[in-house]
Amino acid sequence: MKTKQYKSLLEVKDLQTYFKTDAGIVKAVDGISFDLNEGETLGIVGESGCGKSVTNLSIMRLIQSPPGKIVGGEIFFEGLDILKLPENELRKIRGNEISMIFQDPMTSLNPFLKISTQMVETIRLHQKMSHKEALAKSIQMLQLVGIPVAEEKIYYYPHQFSGGMRQRVMIAMALSCEAKILIADEPTTALDVTIQAQILDLIVELTKKMNTAVILITHDLGVVAGMCDNVCVMYAGKIVEKAKTMELYKNPAHPYTEGLIKSVPRLDRAHKGRLFSIEGQPPNVIDLPDCCPFHPRCHKVMDVCQHHYPPTKDLGDQHEVACWLYVDEKEFPND
Amino acid sequence: MTKYIIRRLLGVIPTLLVIITISFFIVRVAPGGPFDGERALPEVVKRNIEAKYHINDPLLVQYGRYMFDVLRGDLGPSYRYKDHDVNFYIFESLPNSMVLGVIAISISVIFGILSGMLAAIHQNSWIDYLSMALAVVGISVPLFVIGPVLQYVFAMKLGWLPTSGWFSTGDGWKTVILPALTLAFADFATIARLTRSSMLETLRSDYIRTAKAKGMKSSSIIFKHAMKGTMLPIVSYLGPAFAGIITGSVVVEQVFRIPGLGKFFVQSSFNRDYTLIVGVVIVYSVILVIMNFLVDIVYSLLDPRITYT
Amino acid sequence: MNLLNKQAEPQATNEFDQVIVGNSLSKDAWRRLKKNKMAVISVFIVIIYVLLAICAPILPIYPYDEIILDHQHLKPSLVKNAGQLLMEKRMADLYTQAWREGRFELSEEKDDMIWAWIDKGEVNKVWDYMYKEGNIRMAEGTFVFNTAEQRRIDTLNTKLKTDLQISVKKVWYTPEGGKRINISKLPLEEIVAIYADMVGTTSEIETEQYGREIEQQLLKTIMRQNPDLTTEEYNLLLDKELSGLSERKRDTLIRENIVAKITSQAKDIALFDLKEAAGNESVNFPLNKEITIKGALSASVKATKMHERRYYLGTDHQGRDLLSRIIYGGQVSIAIGFIGTITSVLIGTILGALAGYLGGKIDYFIMRVVDIMYGLPYMLLVIIAMAIFGRNIINLFFALAIISWLTISRMVRGQIMSLKNQEFIEAARSMGAPTRRIIFRHLIPNSLSVIIVFSTLRIPSFIMTESFLSFLGLGVQAPYASWGSLVGDAVAGMTLYPWKLFFPALAMTIFLFAMNFLGDGLRDAFDPQSKNQL
Ligand SMILES: Nc1ncnc2c1ncn2[C@@H]1O[C@H](COP(=O)(O)OP(=O)(O)OP(=O)(O)O)[C@@H](O)[C@H]1O
Ligand SMILES: [Mg+2]
């Protein structure tokens, strides 16, 4: 059934995921497209609530329904449309081909089961291993992520671990799957700074070794710069800019990206006065009118921004941006 | 763990003390008892009681003696019946009530959990609607209505089951069915609803999402990951459920004329046989206390987050 | 031209023209509740019930305690009146008797069918069948009543036509040359004197007589409340009751008694007076009339044809109208449900709030009490309390309120513990607000949604508890009724008189359904997260 001709490992095309709530329809993800190649690391950055987690949960088809629903788009994994797969085919992909580190480590582990049970179960689900072997591997993975006395602590329950340790258990569990794609949703938010770098390095090291592609979700542009090949910048459920990492840093095209980069504190540049910050709040994504959702906060705002969503322009070298600044004025809609 | 059990056992003591104290005051001081000269009792009974309670001793001494008696399992003479004391009547009727209660609670737990889980798994399907409709009926309709209605339909109209009676009346086990169903209905309803909502809540939780992301089958997710979290609220409901069964059995025994403790209880509360009423309450309370204790232990076994220290 | 249209209220919008909705919890909850169809229907049902209960005294229904022994166990009927039903019953009875005597022959098959019904105790079916069959034969002329039977039918017919139900509205006393006075407004001595005059004795004899009658009455009540005691015990109880009787209460009892006597005298006289009129087709009933009892005593009475009454829901074993008993029973049940809930919620909220806010020793103590009481089979304690302190509505109510505050106090305590550490409380405290003020002005209003939802769900369980006790005969006592006691009275005869069980049970069930749906709806509205949590 697998079609062998595919361009990239994962192709997301025009994905739309909506939530039905009392207040109206939340368009959490509204027409997102990106590709991910084997061994590549893709960063997704954006403010809180812009739809990063929902995008990745949609890829795994883990959106809680109701209230959520993937209403449009296609997601190809190795040429296979995940959204059309039957449940049992889907199970072969989850955990086996794509594994995920969840954002919230406090609640993502089952509080009623020992770590050992949860890890062994993960490994044995897709790999032919005896219980003993799986246990040995689990301990080894825990040691890798820096859990001291792992052979003892593996018999603990999650509540006996601190938040950071639980995050590491989650990472160990996700990595033990040896999947082709690893989705890491802010994997280091619960960790202290010293450990953060260590864990990120570990993820890089292990994924490079196994040639795993990674989708890294983060607020931290510094992390993105260090790890990712490509970056998507999301705003209010849409990708506003997409580029190679170096290109993005050098020539941020979208005013929002520009603001984001400027607001990162940097040691190599002396600051005069306050750090830059983008004024205002992101909009709520219910009943958003047809306009650039960023326009109230944009310092380069034009008339057209308030009435039409900008088309995506290719600036060359896979650098895409959705902003009226890069659209020829002749092409502006006239009304 | 042992320490935990011991600590819980110690926690039971005040409850028992309170029960015995209330009982003592009811028997000894309540108006209408044999001691305020208001009631003329048969001579024999009177002598029995005087011999038993040493009415002329100070109250505190009497209290101490009463407590000692109760702890020894001696519930004293009856105010009404000369031939036997309270213990005799209780041990005669308790087994009947126990059989009824155990069957009822088993029915309600088994079917409650089953239908609640089915409803949760097939949310918004006809199974869900059916079992929740049944549950609403069970919660809204008092059992003294359900009982007679079942009697009317299954015994009188359809003639499938006997209207009333108990094992010895010749119909054997058939006599148990209607009373047990009646008694089970309310708790079945609550447990079914509780299971459904608890299961839905659990299935929505992050750790179930994690299990799904691993690629586990829905059935193993439900049984391996969701089961314990689902069961916790149900286990803690069991305490009140036992209390409900005890209270309910008073009515059910009345409706179906079952010679159980509950029927005795109502009878003796009509003819003011205080020692017998109090005896029944003590027995019921002890059962309830033991059940609550067991429920606590089971809960602590299920939930690893409970610390035993 | 826009005058008629109301100006649309200006709405706050943001830069995206999105309406900014303030997220007030109660508004949100209200909106969600209105969306819930079952809850809305339930609100209407509850309102109807409450209105019926409140308006019961002014509704056009028969008094709930009026006993008409002729009308025992009449079937519910929308079209037939009591007389027609009685006649049907009599005819069915006569046909059946004739069948038993062999004068009314049926096919063998039918005979077997009827015998089977009789064996199963399904007498209603027999009567229904015989009535139908008999009427057919009568019409065909293949069966005729014999003279004795015909006589019985005729007697019944006259009785049905002429029996009067007299209700005495007021008894008047007209002193010489004065204006007439309602005797219930006179002082006791005068009433006694008037009555003594009426029956031709002296006040002293009457007073003494009434002393004895009251004793008898009390004894009756005691015997009804405590069946199965020995005579000596009854006498002792009576002595106690008598010595506890205050002067005023005694006077009221005597007064009630005498008024009742005079009234019944008035009834007799009216019956006698109206006998003529009752047989006369041209006199229209109901009839209002002034009659003279004796001397200066007169009465206004209203006479109705007794057997023209209609019982839409049938009657009970004393010929009382079931419809009005259900409505008055609902009044008792609903009142106990609401007032009891309010009381227990108040107790629970205050204790829970204290425990939660003050913490420490007080918290420990209150929660220990709650724990211990949770471990008791409290329904049984209520039953004991009823046995000891007597079975009446007030005692029942207190017994229930005292045990039902446990859960709410736990909930409020939990709620307050979590609220306690939030900023706005900290702020109030740091500004020096006293404890009492913090509890009542800040903490309780903020736990209000929990309390409202809980109370709504509490009412049906309160009603259930009340009716549970009344069912056992431990609650409301005759002549008062509650849904529980109506069902309890009906259980014994439910094969013969299923309507006695069916209607009260239905009335009660509908109300409980509605309350439960409403409670669920409120809970979902206030707390959409915990959908369907109990
Ligand atoms: N179950 C849900 N019901 C309703 N709305 C939801 C639900 N889950 C997410 N959303 C909405 O979808 C939008 C995107 O949420 P998402 O979790 O993807 O944000 P995020 O980018 O991951 O933010 P963060 O950086 O804080 O994790 C938010 O506006 C959120 O309110
Ligand atoms: Mg997120």
Image: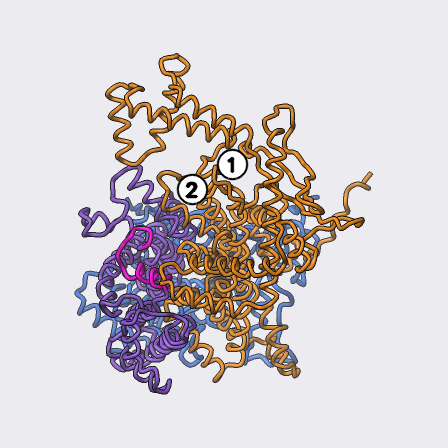
Q: In this view, does B269 lie above or below B8?
A: above
Q: Evaluate whether residue B212 shows in this view.
A: no
Disc number for residue C311: 1
Chain in purple (letter): B
The three-letter amino acid code for the residue at tag 2 is: Phe
Q: What secondary structure prevails in the magenta region?
A: helix
Distance in Å between CA atoms under marks 2 and 1? 15 Å
Quadrant for residue B245, please give it: bottom left
Chain in orange (letter): C
Nearer-the-camera pick, C112 or A8: C112
Q: Which residue is drawn at 22% across and 62% down?
A: B95
Q: Earlier in the sequence, mark 2 or mark 1?
A: 1
Q: How many marks?
A: 2
Magenta run includes residue B264: yes
Disc number for residue C502: 2
| Residue C289 point in image, percent of width and height | 68, 37
Highlighted magenta segment, given as a residue range: B254-271
Q: Evaluate whether residue B148 shows in this view.
A: yes
Nearer-the-camera pick, C496 or C151: C151
Query: Please, which chain is the residue tagged with disc 1 on?
Result: C
Q: From the image, state the color of chain A.
A: blue
